[in-house]
Every structure is written in structure tokens, then in C-alpha cells.
Amino acid sequence: MRTIIGEAADSDAAPGTDAQKIGDLFTSFMDTDTIAAAGLGPVADELSSVAGAADRAALASVLGRLQRVGVGGAFGHYVDTDSKNSQRYLMHVAQGGIGLPDESYYREEQYAEIRDEYVAHIGRMFALAGIEHDPQRVFALESKLAAGHWDVVKRRDADLTYNLVTLESVLTDLPGFDWSGWIAATGATAEQWNEIVVRQPSFLEVFTQAWADESLDEWKAWASWRILRARAPYLTDAFVDENFAFYGRTLTGARRFANAGSAACHSCRTFSVRPSENSTSNAISRPRRRPGCRCSSRTSPRRTGRASPTWSG
């Protein structure tokens, strides 16, 4: 794989070809000088769009645009075969919005230390970005979302997780969130969302209630964290190291990153795949977790000599 991707990077391939795209991705991943010089610049517009949202409808549209480019929102969405009718594809919606592996991490005593470390991690990431948000309040909002998550056993039930609904019923039964604005911002149409498989319908009720109850500023802080968390593996060394310190070392016990070339190759082959059902990032275009990885968070490999663990999420 490394040889094939390296050849693509050195091939001077014609613009628009797969070889050119793969080669450019590999080269940009390895260009640490440019990454360091860019600093927080690559995500500045995304953070500004959140900060500048004037109301909940505007923020819903921002979240839709962010999900289109790989920043997970409060719920994930993807297109898959209708499990009751293999002749068609439907949009599927699944629970999301949290940064720990699953809902049990927010309530079980055995994870108390990890919860403390997670809040501290959010705080350090905000500090690196120069953002003055309270990490404890972000965690509190995530905890409310986690309280609505289905546990791992219930999520595996094929019948319980097949709930065919119409967009019209969603608009009627789950008011408050600007579904139409959010859908348009993802680049989809109402027709494409006419029928939807909702995997955890009670979670959407919890989410829309929290959307109404929590202040706009609370949701902006949460959205800012979602951006930093999704983009950290591709920013400067300070972000990469802090991201790995929590998602690699604290959550999984990983001691070191893989080499830079392996990390870059892994990123080249893991974009634009369907998200895992366990994903806490839940964006359509996101790296897939390797089998066996207990952390479902996005901690994808990056390009330094210390670059990423032997898995990504």
C-alpha cells in the first residue's frame, strides 16, 4: 500500500485522476512545515460560522454544512440498503453527539476517572484554540445526549433499530429543530429524505428536547468542541499530541504513534466510508475504525514522526 500511494504522489498524474487525488492527500498529510505554519487557520472559518450563528435555525444550518464535510453532529446520517426491501436505498439516522465511546462512559462509576480526564482534555483543546468555553458545560450537554443513547445490546436488535418514518412525520413529531434547513445545508433535498430509517427514535426525542432547553451559547460551545475534536488529527503537533494523549493513551492504553508514512497511507485509504454504528463522530465522510478498536472516537493518524496509533476512529 505504501509503495502504491508513494508512486501516486511521485507520478505527476493528470489533474482530476484518482492518482492525483491520492498523491496530493498523501503529500499534504506529510507536509509538516505547511501544517505548522497554517496553525488553526484551516478551521478558523468553521469556528467562526458557529460563533456567528444568530439563532438556532442558523446554527442548525451550520451543523448541516459541517456534517457534510466530516464534523459529526448530534446524530449521524448515511445512505444504506433498506433492510426490509433490498431493492432500494434509504437515508438512515443514528444517535450521536458524544465524544466518549458510548453512553455507559457517562454514567458508570468505573469510568469516573476517564470522565474527569475527558473534561480536562476538552479544556486543553479549547486553550490550544484560544476559545473561552467551559469544558464542564460541554460535558454536561453531552451527558444529556448520552442519557438518550441506546446501549450496545439494544443497538444490535435488528427489529428495534428499524423504524421507517416519513420526513413529514419527523417535522410534525419532532418540532423545534430546523430539520428542513439542516437537510438543505447537508446538500440533500427533501425528496431524498422522504422516507427515513431511524435507528434510535427515542434518542431524537431527547435531542430535540435538549435543543429547545439548552441555550444557544451552550450549543455553540458544544459545536466548537465537535469541530476541534474532528479536525485535531490534521492540525498542528500540539493538537495531534493532545488528541492522542486522550483518545489514544487514556482510552486505549496506546503508548506511541505509528510511523508517519503508515499514518498517511491509512488516511488515504479510509476516507468516504459509511460511519460505524458505534461512531461518536457520525459524519458521512469519516475514517472507519479498525476492527477491534474499543474507542469509537475520531483519532485518525497524522503525519509526524510520532504520528498516530495503530488504529483510527
Image (spheres, rainbow, N blue to C red):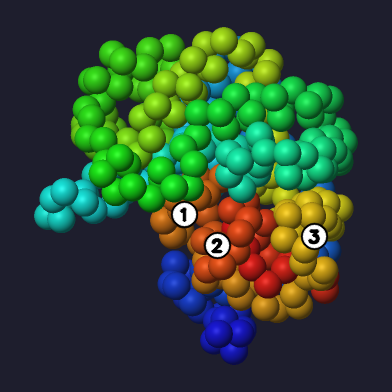
Q: Residues within 10 Å of mark 1 (few under 14, many from 20)?
A: some
Q: CA distance from mark 2 to mark 3?
A: 16 Å
Q: Quadrant of residue 34?
A: bottom right
Crowd band around label 2 with a 10 angstrom C-alpha radius: few (<14), some (14–19), many (20+): many
Front residue of 306 and 100 = 100
Is residue 112 placed above or below 300 in the rendered structure?
Answer: above
In the rendering, which numbered label is found on residue 13? Answer: none
- Which of discs 2 and 3 lies nearer the camera? The answer is 3
Q: Is residue 277 above or below residue 201?
A: below
Gap between marks 1 and 3, in whole Å? 22 Å
Q: Which mark is residue 289?
A: 2
The image shows residue 32, relative to residue 222, as above or below, that is below
Mark 1 lies on residue: 276
Give the camera-side residue of 304 and 143.
Answer: 143
Count of residue discs: 3
Give percent across and percent down for residue 166. 22, 27
What residue is pinned by disc 3? 249
